[in-house]
Image (cartoon, rainbow, N blue to C red):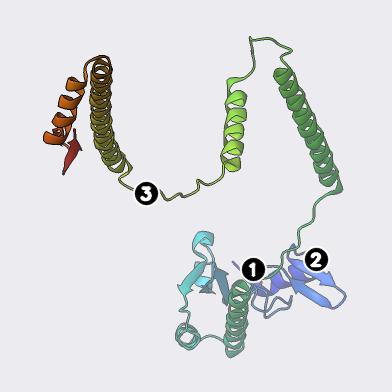
Amino acid sequence: MQHDEVIWQVIRHKHCSYMAKINTGIFCRNPYNVTGICNRSSCPLANSRYATIRDHDGVFYLYMKTIERAHKPNELWERVKLPRNYLKALEIIDKHLMYWPQLLMHKIKQRLTKMTQMRIRMRKLALKTREKIMTTPRKEKKREARREEKAEKAAVLDKSIEKELLERLKKGVYGDIYNYPFNEYERILEDQVESEEEVEEEPEIEYVEGYEGLEEEDDIEDFGGFAMDRSHKASAAADNDDDDEEDQGEDAVEWKRLKSGSSSAQKRHKKGESGTKVKKRARVLVEVEHEDAAGRRKATL
């Protein structure tokens, strides 16, 4: 049978695994302890009738232990869930601990108050943004620094090799056959195309006259008509000159004949000049029509 006084004498004066002795006092590390102090009224092992409050993921539970279940360790504690409302939780505690010692009931209510305040503070701290200080070992820092230095050296070396190879390709050191990675070749071509596109300037906007072809055709037609008029005029003038030359030739021949002839012939010639008038040649008017041209062109002969 369980005897609370014997258990307390053994725990207090001999050995207890939950006891923690420090300069300020003796404390208890048992999670079911109400006050956390190691004494006769607060010890959960030396009291067969005991109650406490525990927290499970932000939810409070009322734990109760009675002497009737002492022979069943797996069913030793009875658990009741407490609501988040503080006043309703106090009502449930009063209901379940109505016939329990007042001192124990008062300690449980004090524990509920402290745990509620702690939950409120935790919620406020979670909402605040706080700096988290992280410590890194020296070895890791040195290792990262060495890796960065090696990576920088490798990058510089790769760039220098790439630049040297490009210069050799431009000079034609390797001839016409190239055996280098296709992806790198495409990347270099894309960079060159992008640089050329950046160098190209925007096209300038120019304004020109419209209907140039039609105006040229009209000018050609006008020029053709004008040339035809000039040709007709030139041919008419040439015919007139030929006629004048023939008339002059005939007159000269007739004058020589008269000089060599008798005086009677000269008299007849003078009479003919006075009696008859020289007939003038009539002018011929020629009209030329063009299908494409709007008007008519006239030429005189």
Crowdedness near tag 2: few (<14), some (14–19) or many (≥20) residues, C-alpha within 10 Å: few
Q: Secondary structure at mark 2?
A: loop
Pair 3/1: label in front: 3
Of mark 1 and mark 2, the one earlier in the sequence is 2
Instruction: Point out the image quarter for the C terminus.
Output: top left
Q: Is residue 293 left or right of residue 238?
A: left
Pointer 3: what residue?
Answer: 209
- Which one is in front, 41 or 91? 91
Estimate the spatial distance between the alpha carbons at disc 3 and disc 2, rounded to whole Å: 118 Å
* Vertical order, 136 against 131 (above or below): above
Report x, y in % for residue 146.
Answer: 84, 39
Disc 3 marks which amino acid? Glu
Pointer 1: what residue?
Answer: 31
Circle 3/circle 2 CB separation < 8 Å: no
Q: Give the quarter of the image for residue 29.
A: bottom right
Q: Which mark is residue 14?
A: 2
Pair 1/2: label in front: 1
